Structures are given as structure tokens and as C-alpha cells.
Image: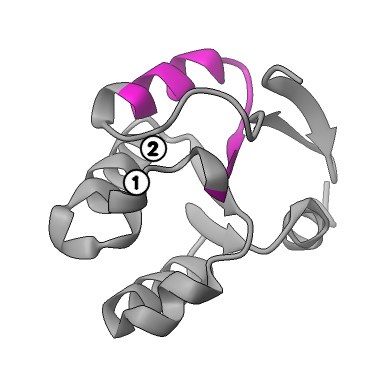
Amino acid sequence: MPDVVQERAGVSVLVCDPDGPRVASTQDALDLIGASFGTELVAVPVDRLDERFFTLSTRVAGEIMQKFVNYRVRLAVVGDISAHLAASSALRALVRESNAAGHVWFVPDLDALDARLRPMNAGS
């Protein structure tokens, strides 16, 4: 399946294909941001992210997340990252802080993303 735009819980979301191109650099992030024109959020499956994303010392996660923040496009990392979390207290802290804010979320699946989006649109 190609990347597709879907309305999820009242929000326009670019849902990325798990088999699509790897997201490994800021240019890859910019390509997704460009493809997301007209949407509010990009949902990227864990399988699309380069392994370096989960090793914070590489700065890949920070650089990619910063591009989304700069362009005011929300990012959801979708999938199981429990193995990465078990290996890194820094990553656990990043995920906790990100999930407490509104711009970058880490969710286990699209249903969990929908649940996060619903309260944001309850008053719409």
C-alpha cells in the first residue's frame, strides 16, 4: 500500500506504508513533510525508521523530530518500540516527554493514535 491520506478521529493524517522508503535523514523527514501537505499529522511506522533513530547519541531522532516541529506538522511513530525502550533510559525519557506534549507521539498502533486524537477534536 502506498502512503495514504486518511481522516482519523477527525484529523487529516498521512499514514505511511510500512514498506515505503526508510526515514534515516533530515531530507527524508522533509520529503514526508512535503508529501503531507494539507494534513495535520504524519503517522510513520517503526519499520520505516532507520535503527539509528532509536540510538539518541546519533542525533537522528532529534534532527528528524525537529524538522516536524519546525514545519508544524505533527509526527506519530507507530509500532512496538519496547526492545528499544528496554535498552535506553534516555529513549524512555524522550518518549515520555514527547507523549506528554502534543507534537510528537509514540503509539503502539493506529487505534492508539485515534484514541489520542479524539480528545483533541471533542470540542470541534
Is 77 included in the stretch rendered in magenta? no
Q: How is the image coloured?
A: one colour
Image quarter in which the N terminus is found: top right
Q: Are marks 2 and 1 in contact (CB under 8 Å)?
A: yes
Magenta range is 28-46
Q: Is residue 28 above or below residue 90?
A: above
Q: Is residue 113 left or right of residue 16?
A: right
- Front position in the image: 71 or 30: 30
Q: Percent position (x, y) of residue 112?
A: 77, 62
* Mark number displayed over residue 17: none
- Callout 1 secondary element: helix
Q: Is residue 70 above or below residue 27?
A: below
Q: Which residue is mark 2?
A: 68
The three-letter code of the residue at mark 2 reads Phe
- Front position in the image: 86 or 30: 86
- Front position in the image: 98 or 88: 88
Q: Percent position (x, y) of residue 38?
A: 62, 17
Residue, x 26% and y 30% (percent of image)? 26
* Mark number displayed over residue 65: 1
Q: Is residue 99 left or right of residue 61?
A: right
Q: Is residue 64 above or below residue 76?
A: above
Residue, x 31% and y 85% (percent of image)? 89
Is 45 included in the stretch rendered in magenta? yes
* Residue 107 figure quarter: bottom right
* Residue 42 figure quarter: top right
The three-letter code of the residue at mark 1 reads Met
Q: Percent position (x, y) of residue 57?
A: 14, 62
Alpha-carbon span between mark 2 and mark 1:
5 Å
Q: How many marks?
A: 2
Residue, x 68% and y 63% (percent of image)? 108
Q: Is residue 81 left or right of residue 84?
A: right
- Callout 2 secondary element: helix
